[in-house]
Image (cartoon, helix red, strand yellow):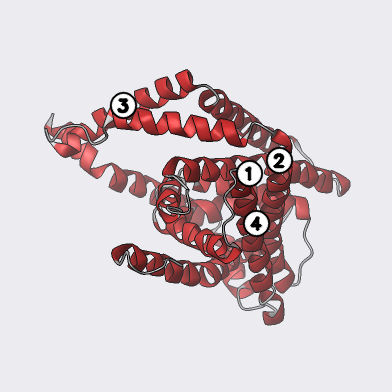
Amino acid sequence: MAETSFLARRWKLIVNLITLAALVFLVVAIRGQLADTFENLFKVHAWALLLIIPVEFLNYDAQARLYKSLFAITENNLGYWRLYAASLELNFINNVFPSGGVTGISYFGVRMRGADITGAKATVVQLLKLVLLFLSFEVLIVFGLFCLAIEGRMNSLILLVAGMLTTVLVIGTAGFAYIIGSERRIAGFFTWATRALNRFLAGFRRGRGDAINVERARAVFEDLHRNYMFIQSDKRKLRAPFVWALLANFWEVVAVYVVYLAFGHLVNFGAVILAYAVANFAGLVSVLPGGVGIYEGLMTLVLTATGVPSRLSLPVTVMYRVLNTLVQLPPGYYFYHQTLNAVRKPGEERA
């Protein structure tokens, strides 16, 4: 029992140590190319790197308009800049708190309180945003495979990776729609999940009762179902949100490609799409902030498999991650801090 309690307390440390061991193995495997990598880091065109700023602006513009179009379906007209700031805040939270986006979903419900927006409605909008982002990425994957095929870069490994990604996207989306589309199924599934989570947390709470009230959780899930059914009642209304989701994904891939331009290389756009997809899906389950290490390693491996040498793909990936952090996290932290101050002082208007 003592051993189980120790493992429960130290599970994150154990997983982090395993992750770091895997990264050490990766570094050893490519040690012969590290010298070229660091040399390439200083051979960039600064003017090209600056292009990442307008590209990321367009990315968050698409995200804000995606939120705005989803809320418009629920007959809530929210301001563009409020949603733009919220998008930056969510990016900050999902990078600082590694929880596969769960923390961001919870925060969004709190962030959108007011203006007749319940926590359940905000949660459904955030979940639908994620679903649309996943579905729209299938379009990009198909386009990416087409780009690779044109240059003869297709092989069995690439087809396997693309097939696995597409399968996960389709099954995950179908499973989400199946569960949330029925009041009985959503209540049954999430009530079971809540009880399972309470049993898991019991070892940490040491007899202080359930961490989550099951009946209250059931009411929240039923509210989620009602809001979901209202939004998807006319699927034609989801066309505009789907286009904005596709553009949000497209601009983020372009941000990676801009770094290749800064290094003076025109690589296959399809290779960047596939590598970006694999790295981001793996980052969802990483316990390290922003999927650091796992993200860079997988993106480099996929790009290498498509014919981009690791002496180029590794420095580009590192540079992209650094620039992305510098461009996105500071404003995200600023808006997050502003929101926290507004919550502490209810009399003040939120950003």
Percent x, y for residue 239?
73, 42
N-terminal of the two: label 1 or label 2? 1
Quarter of the rendering occupied by the N terminus: top left
State the separation of the CA atoms marked 2 and 3.
36 Å
N-terminal of the two: label 3 or label 4? 4
* Kind of residue at disc 2: Lys
* Kind of residue at disc 1: Ile
Query: Neighbour class for label 3 at 10 Å: few (<14), some, many (≥20)?
Result: few
Query: Neighbour class for label 4 at 10 Å: few (<14), some, many (≥20)?
Result: many
Residue in the picture at 41% in, 59% down? 96
Q: In this image, 122 relative to 146: left or right?
A: left
* Kind of residue at disc 4: Arg
Q: In this image, 201 relative to 287: left or right?
A: left
Viewer-proximal residue, 92 or 148? Answer: 92
* Kind of residue at disc 3: Ala
State the separation of the CA atoms marked 4 and 1.
12 Å
N-terminal of the two: label 2 or label 4? 4
The residue under label 3 is 196
Please tell me the numbered disc located at residue 65.
Answer: 4
The residue under label 2 is 237
State the separation of the CA atoms marked 1 and 2.
7 Å
- Do the residues under discs 1 and 2 have CB atoms within 8 angstroms? yes
